[in-house]
Image: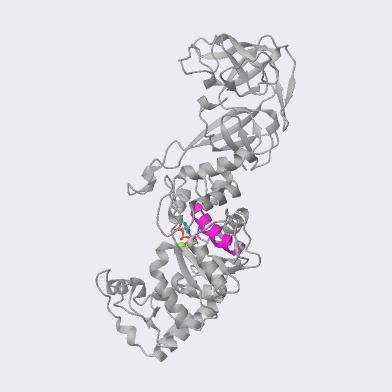
Amino acid sequence: MTTEAPSKPRDFIREIVEADLAAGRYQRVITRFPPEPNGYLHIGHAKSICLNFGIAGEFGGQCNLRFDDTNPTKEEVEFSESIKRDVAWLGFSWDDNLFHASDYFDQLYAWGEELILKGKAYVDSSSADEMRAMRGTLIEAGQESAYRTRSVDENLDLFRRMKAGEFPDGAHVLRAKIDMASPNINMRDPVLYRIRHERHDRTGDAWCIYPLYDYAHPLSDAIEHITHSLCTLEFEDHRPLYDWLIESVSVPSRPRQYEFARLNLNYTVMSKRKLLRLVEEKHVNGWDDPRMPTIAGLRRRGYTPASIRNFCERVGVAKRENVIDAGLVEFCVREDLNTTAPRVMGVLDPLRVVIDNYPEGETEWFDTGTRKVPFARTLLIEREDFMEEPPNKFFRLAPGREVRLRSAYFITCTGVVKDDAGNIVELHATYDPATRGGDSPDGRKPKATLHWVSADHAVDCEVRLYDRLFRSENPEESGNFLDDLNPNSLQVVPRAKLEPSVRGAAPFTRYQFERLGYFCVDPDSSGEAIVFNRTVTLKDTWAKVK
Ligand code: ATP
Ligand code: MG
């Protein structure tokens, strides 16, 4: 056994893997991440990705990316591409191990015949309604189908003719012959194959029967020599069927399934079906809308792969269902960006300040080490950083008061200009040349430090501010999650003013805007017109800022 660095993740699955390797049950661990390409990946999938690829990496094994494409659908290509992009972006590699359940259609079909020959499967010609009615309930046993006693020859003949396309959709299904009285409904002669005359993206028109997930999944695992098949808790009741299939046909390996609790986040919906509705009904602007819990959405919002991996590690892997606070995701990205995102200054709601004793036409460039920031006679500050009649706890700019302009000078407000309606349109101020760089030789310490930009040098940018997409902790509680949408989840600032160092920033460049939060350049930007997404606000409240 190896000794591990204390920072390595520990959980019951890693303990099992470690014990299996130590006991020599496997030479090498092989896991897989098996998404169905019917939507974009979300942060819940990230948990599964980090677990499967993480374990493979830590134990010197392999993790396959396997598309569970047993369901022929139209848009699989877009979804498969997005899934590959997202897994790679998270920092994981499947090397050459990219597979599809559809790669195994021939083998899966052959095992269907094998089950029939062993008397372990039969063709049922009941309708879907009849089968549902005969399935029984949690407290009542199901009833055996009249077709259950068909001979092996008849079953084989029908199954072959199903495959040959002789029957319409729904005419027959192949079912496992297990136990209609089993307390586990999954064991009541589950359907293994159904007829669907539909074209498949990868196999074209080769097939008109398609295997069900519960059949294809364990057998695909076996084909790939998966050692530990990790899935979420809702599959616990499917494990007896998983094991039954592995026992019943001549598989090349015997994987074992282990279940862990799925990731749930408050203020978030995570089922692909619901995310699809948000996209299709245009409640958001696509799968990668920065308000979406999709990997693509988080990426566009400015999240880093490291922050998502750290989040998954913090959440950990356990058997008990729980709901994680959405604030933890934000905490993780703040923690990362705090050390990686360069600082710049930008003003979202500008108010002009004229420095009367600063020479007209002059520009001074303050070098912060990472960039140069111009200072001139006309500046812009945040409108809410000024109050004409400040209450007790307001320490920012006010008539007669001195504040520090970050990295520049101390200024004192000397006048307020208003329009006819009484709105403040401009401030006048004086600066103290002795405070150059933001410190006073006489030890004066203003109670507030403001961010600012030079009006003539500022770059106009669109800034998109986000709030939670849903209003309540559990958006599904009310019955219809769409009723819980937050109407103010996106606020657009069409012309924020940014310091000129952001000019030319490429999409996905991340910054900390002093005092305002972390921001990321949106791919909607084009040339001079930069669009920023606010990734997350700063944890510090205004009052705590130096
Ligand atoms: P959804 O329920 O959101 O529609 P799914 O389970 O149908 O997702 P799949 O593409 O089948 O989506 O999932 C691929 C893998 O990701 C599965 O192994 C599944 O268990 C895992 N997974 C899906 N959602 C979560 C989650 N919230 N937390 C952890 N793992 C998840
Ligand atoms: Mg699924």
Which residues are the magenta region? 38-56
In the rendered image, the quadrant that contains the N terminus is bottom right
- Asked whether residue 491 is drawn in magenta, I would say no
Q: Which of 26 and 140 is in front in this view?
A: 26
Which quadrant of the figure has residue 532? top right
The residue sitting at 42% across, 71% down in the picture is 239
Q: In this view, does 347 lie above or below 59?
A: above
- Asked whether residue 40 is drawn in magenta, I would say yes
Q: How many labels does the image show?
A: 0
Q: Which of 115 and 72 is in front in this view?
A: 115
Q: Is residue 509 visible?
A: yes
Q: Nearer the viewer, residue 429 or 209?
A: 429
The residue sitting at 47% across, 85% down in the picture is 113
Q: Is residue 470 left or right of residue 253?
A: left
Q: Is residue 273 above or below residue 266?
A: below
- Image coordinates of residue 534 in percent, x first then y, are 56, 37
- Image coordinates of residue 61 in percent, x first then y, are 61, 67
Most extreme residue toward the left, as rendered? 140
Which quadrant of the figure has residue 233? bottom left
Q: In this view, does 446 lie to the left or right of 361?
A: left
- Image coordinates of residue 380 in percent, x first then y, are 62, 20
Q: Is residue 290 visible?
A: no
Magenta span main SS: helix
Q: Is residue 175 left or right of residue 454?
A: left
Q: Is residue 357 above or below residue 31?
A: above
In the rendered image, the quadrant that contains the C terminus is top right
The residue sitting at 42% across, 44% down in the picture is 267
- Image coordinates of residue 430 in percent, x first then y, are 64, 10
The coloring applied to the image is one colour
